[in-house]
Amino acid sequence: MEDKKISERSYEFALRIFKLCKYLERDGAFGIIVKQLLKSGTSIGANVEEALGGQSKKDFIAKMSIAYKEARETNYWLRLTRDTETISSDRITELIEESEQILKILSSILITSKRNP
């Protein structure tokens, strides 16, 4: 994926998560995982958007921190989905890699934001 703003990237990631959850929902046996994955995977972008509209630097850092935690949770659910062989690993590997890239970007944003007054 080309270098994009975190807001665009997290939005596109949320769309992909939505499509994955829609696919997994067809089976019906993975209801809990689907709910958790959909909630955390779409929350990343929502919190990034809130951070960008934050009223203060403290607010920005707080919302970006939540986005980071949601990205970690999403990565967990994606790995669990892969490791239970619910879906072909090729299909989920790209999403796992993207979640890891989003985590790195969010981590970098948080480190920079906390350093600079």
Image (spheres, rainbow, N blue to C red):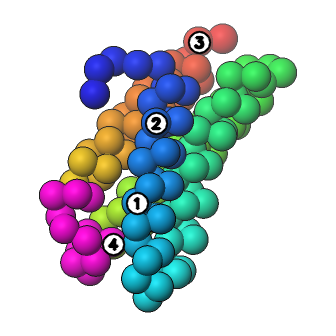
Residue at which label 1 appears: 20
| Horizontal arrangement in the rendering, residue 29 relative to residue 36 (left or right) | left
Q: Nearer the viewer, residue 32 or 51?
A: 32
> Residue lying farthest right?
55
Mark 1 neighbour density, 10 Å: few (under 14) some (14–19) many (20 or more): some
Residue plotted at (22% across, 78% down)? 85
Q: Which mark is residue 62?
A: none
Residue plotted at (50% across, 26% down)? 8
> Marks 3 and 2: CB-CB under 8 Å?
no
Q: Which residues are magenta?
A: 81-92
Query: Is disc 4 placed on a helix, strand or loop?
Result: helix
Type of amino acid at the residue the image marks with label 4: Leu
Residue plotted at (30% across, 52% down)? 96
Where residue 101 sits: x, y (%)? 33, 36
Is tag 1's residue or tag 4's residue first in the polypeptide sequence? 1
Q: Nearer the viewer, residue 87 or 106?
A: 87
Q: Which mark is residue 12?
A: 2
Where is the C terminus found, in terms of image quarters? top right
